[in-house]
């Protein structure tokens, strides 16, 4: 079994060279984020991920979680890992210093997040949901609520959850039925929520639920929804944990993967809750959590694919089987061209994903801290455009990449003890939760492109053209592939702008291909940037030749093997939606 | 949970119209195969599949199999289903009448096979392996061996297995170490075999193992391998089952899927065996089983995708969530364009797969029975070309299609009780066993294309061009998409023929894309044929309007959404293998 080794070198390259750490460190409050500090933080986090968290991955998969008397029990190894995680001060690395956080840029904390996710995806969801909840609390909670809850959550002493889904309300939150009635300063929340990630656990002394609920006499639909903070245990005035609130864990789901993450059915019966934000603003408040959670889930796709890649690479390097051109006798399967194709597909796409995700998160830092309103608008528009792509494209590709990881193992990949299949099972949730790929694609094409007639996207395509046109010498092939893909994408955008109004089913019908097309293109864009920087470093006589040469090869491989998918998606887009809408249910049934 | 309903209408369309049942029924010995008989057989098999086999699918997944005292125990529900299967005479439907079979063309038995596979993939592997083994026995066994074993296996009273893999010998069978020493007329076989599908069971009174083994003083490599029949129980002279042979089941694997299929580690200790074929011809004899098994595994990919499609369709028709263009209020998710895209992706690709696979099997019938040697050569060349494509392309696409099936279910898809995830887990073995996709792709590009400078393939591309050129009216869009894809494929073939000799890593490096390109193209070819026939029927005033109109829509959808992948593969092919071969292990490790 291959250990997990965090790809610190690539992370630092992306942080420094592609996402522009220097500019971010120049923003107010981020002065601490020097290259040396960042490297030290990443090295330390890499050790935690490798030595403490990663060994719990298979344990969690095998043992899973269960419910005893309305209380979720998780594997004891998870407790020990979590203790080291909070003792090291890791939960607060990117959080508000006013409440005990370290206030580092998101661009740094994302690297730590990646490592935790690669080390143990199921375990990492506990801190991730806590961060989502505490950010919503920070943005929308009263000072009194923040004083009680925020510090404990930033310290990781209490964890947080997001309670949205109900059996009849999945992607469509207008159907939420959980209701809240006022009771003095507080509210009484009643209803049943399903699919609550880390909805309960026995690691920390409290769990803070954020619950989307309908208030009495509220209008139907999403405008009637408000957000409530509902603690598992009520908190006394001195901040100590008091009596149990009326929240019970009914069951945990039996899932395909992320077995170490308890997915709970929670029952609220007149549970005491506190409103966050204004009445009726529940969905808006929830989206504070959701947008950052969507970037995080995109990151999860990359992280699990990175781990799968490392696993497959070490297997391929060890496994001797067959003969290969240019070699005497039996060789490791790494020498078979088709195995190299699979490994490089994994490597190049993971690096493309990392670059796109980290760059998006760099824009988030700029949008949050830039003093120039125009720059804030610019960076926020990039974040908005990139968020559904990071979530949708990365998690979709993670399905194929983790499956390729299984394939490289041959028959051994199908045996659970090998560990390769777990990544694939774990990854399968990622295109579903925090908004399915269909939801992301609809958000992208509707809110992020059509609503502004493609302004932000067009500017970005112009930027890609400028980059592609400047690539020459050994990068000329990358440049022409990128330029060709960019033209295909531009043509699709033009087609969409010209045609979408003619048929209201067009945006939904072409949205998946639009998202996947832009993901593939943006991956190529960032790898081309990386190759260009690497070529400059090599020309400048840098010492780390191997790494920079690999960057160029990886970008080339991606240009050869992944960028061609852009034209395929573009053609599907320009076919519109008429055919798919014409088929009847009887015809779908073959009758 | 949706029941399984065999797509008899589409099967009959493919059998009659695309694979040409009438021509096959004109071959000697196949006169019985009239359209009426075929329809009756399919309807009866559909009932067996639906009522008897399909209900065991989830049971097998949940209960799995286990070993007690060296004996595999399978779920009791499997025994009952198997009894009805053999009582109905189904095992012998395509087998030699001389030994009790019914001698129907493979084109008919394949439809029955598809139904069993859709109903319960894990269970269906038991008959499948038995058929592989009995075909090898029939082709290479002595009359004495056939007299003892063949009738029992055709009746399904005894099952059969294929024993190839050893820990150090997976794709590379030259590494096999199991050995056999002569002992009178028989041999003593010793060694350990792994990954033996249905290597043992407690349903029938005997299990007949075909074991690839090295003989004493045999040359190294595959030329030293011979094939042995090794029964679990020795057979007395009167044909009754005698004492236990020295074959023990050491364990069954804990796998990602096909839990109902015992994947065994078998230990042979001086077990009594009988040679099939000549000494040193083991691999050739094994390939008798393997080629037909590869077509069957391709079929498995289609069958499990068909089942996943039915499951997803019924969920989508039932699940009310969200709003859709042109509808008032909440709608079933079937009305969302992106859900239709997913469903039609499944439907169109499954129908493309069925058409390609059945057409390949129709060629098999012609090759076996045609009196004209030129025609035999023609049909056999088609079978040879299509076999790795049916195996490789269908099983690769089955990964995505079963995953799309999960996606359509949203969060419910990730919950095991829903059943959608099982198809995905079950499907994952299909690109691995009976030769990985890499092995299929190598076989295609090396033995089936380069060895004959693309003769068979070129003729087929000419045929596609002729078809595409003749599509007009409402089929014009299909024609131009097919023609464009065909040009891309031809260009890739030309490139390959011109360049492969310049670098021995090119065939292996581009083989995957070559296989996937041809699969996507051939799927489009068969659906275009189907659309053309459907248009003629509609013009002729046929009554089954809905079915034939759906055929045209399905072909259109495929042309819009799947055929564009051809150009992406073509571009990757023409990038060659230089980039993938240039990267070092240290670079792959990111060091």
Image: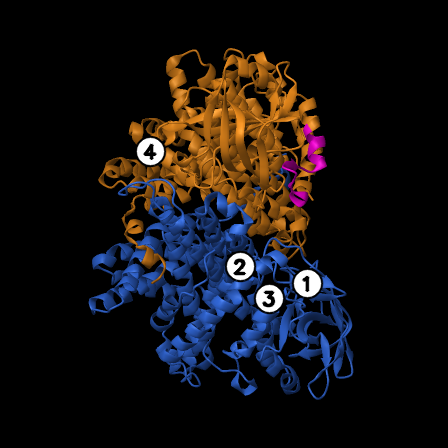
Chain colours: A orange, B blue
Circle on res. A446: 4
Left or right: A577, with A270 as reference point: left
Residue occupied by mark 1? B264
Q: Is residue A472 visible to the viewer in this orientation of the structure?
A: no
Label 3: element kind: helix
Q: Residue at x 49, y 47 (%)?
A: B413
Residue occupied by mark 3? B77
Q: Tell which tag, 3 or 1, sits nearer the viewer.
A: 3
Relative to A160, residue B545 above or below: below
Residue occupied by mark 2? B442
Q: Do labels 2 and 4 touch, CB within 8 Å? A: no
Q: Position of residue A23 (x, y in %)?
A: 49, 16
Q: Are marks 3 and 4 on the same chain?
A: no
Q: Quadrant of the C terminus of chain A?
A: bottom left
Q: Position of residue A392 (x, y in %)?
A: 45, 37
Q: Tell which tag, 3 or 4, sits nearer the viewer.
A: 3
Name the residue at the front extreme. Answer: A183
Label 4 is found on which chain of the structure? A
């Amino acid at each position: 079994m291959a250990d997990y080794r965090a790809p610190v070198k690539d992370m630092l390259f992306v942080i420094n060279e592609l996402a522009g750490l220097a500019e971010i460190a120049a923003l107010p409050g981020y002065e601490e984020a020097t290259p040396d500090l960042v490297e030290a933080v990443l090295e330390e986090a890499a050790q935690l991920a490798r030595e403490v968290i990663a060994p719990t991955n298979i344990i969690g998969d095998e043992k899973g979680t269960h419910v005893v008397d309305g209380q979720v029990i998780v594997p004891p190894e998870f407790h020990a890992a979590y203790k080291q995680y909070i003792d090291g001060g890791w939960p607060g690395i990117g959080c508000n210093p006013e409440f005990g956080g370290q206030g580092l840029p998101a661009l740094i904390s994302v690297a730590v997040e990646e490592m935790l996710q690669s080390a143990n995806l199921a375990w990492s969801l506990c801190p991730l949901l806590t961060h989502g909840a505490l950010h919503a609390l920070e943005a929308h909670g009263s000072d009194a609520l923040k004083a009680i809850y925020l510090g404990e959550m930033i310290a990781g002493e209490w964890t947080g959850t997001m309670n949205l889904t109900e059996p009849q309300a999945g992607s469509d939150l207008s159907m939420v039925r959980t209701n809240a009635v006022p009771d003095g300063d507080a509210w009484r929340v009643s209803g049943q929520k399903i699919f609550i990630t880390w909805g309960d656990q026995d690691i920390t002394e409290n769990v803070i639920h954020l619950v989307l609920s309908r208030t009495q006499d509220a209008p139907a639909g999403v405008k009637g929804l408000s957000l409530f903070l509902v603690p598992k245990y009520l908190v006394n005035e001195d901040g100590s944990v008091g009596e149990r609130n009326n929240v019970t864990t009914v069951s945990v789901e039996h899932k395909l993967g992320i077995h170490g993450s308890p997915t709970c059915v929670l029952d609220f019966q007149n549970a005491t809750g506190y409103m966050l934000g204004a009445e009726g603003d529940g969905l808006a408040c929830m989206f504070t959590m959701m947008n950052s959670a969507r970037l995080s889930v995109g990151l999860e796709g990359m992280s699990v694919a990175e781990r799968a890649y490392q696993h497959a690479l070490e297997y391929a390097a060890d496994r001797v089987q067959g003969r290969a051109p240019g070699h005497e006798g039996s060789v490791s399967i790494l020498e078979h061209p088709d195995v190299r194709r699979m490994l490089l597909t994994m490597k190049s796409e993971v690096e493309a994903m990392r670059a796109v995700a980290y760059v998006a998160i760099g824009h988030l830092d700029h949008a949050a801290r830039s003093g120039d309103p125009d720059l804030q608008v610019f960076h926020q528009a990039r974040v908005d455009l990139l968020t559904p792509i990071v979530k949708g494209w990365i998690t979709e590709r993670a399905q194929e990449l983790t499956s390729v990881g299984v394939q490289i193992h041959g028959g051994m990949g199908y045996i659970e003890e090998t560990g390769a299949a777990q990544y694939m099972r774990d990854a399968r949730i990622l295109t579903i939760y925090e908004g399915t790929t269909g939801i992301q694609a609809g958000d992208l094409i509707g809110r992020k492109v059509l609503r502004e007639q493609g302004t932000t996207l067009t500017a970005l395509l112009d930027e890609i053209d400028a980059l592609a046109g400047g690539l020459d010498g050994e990068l000329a092939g990358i440049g022409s592939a990128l330029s060709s893909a960019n033209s295909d994408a531009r043509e699709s955008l033009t087609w969409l702008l010209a045609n979408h109004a003619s048929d209201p089913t067009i945006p939904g019908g072409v949205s998946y291909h639009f998202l996947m097309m832009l993901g593939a293109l943006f991956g190529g864009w960032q790898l081309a940037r990386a190759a260009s920087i690497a070529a400059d470093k090599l020309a400048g006589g840098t010492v780390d030749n191997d790494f920079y040469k690999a960057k160029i090869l990886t970008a080339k491989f991606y240009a050869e093997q992944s960028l061609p998918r852009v034209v395929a998606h573009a053609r599907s887009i320009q076919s519109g939606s008429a055919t798919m809408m014409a088929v009847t249910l009887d015809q779908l049934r073959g009758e």
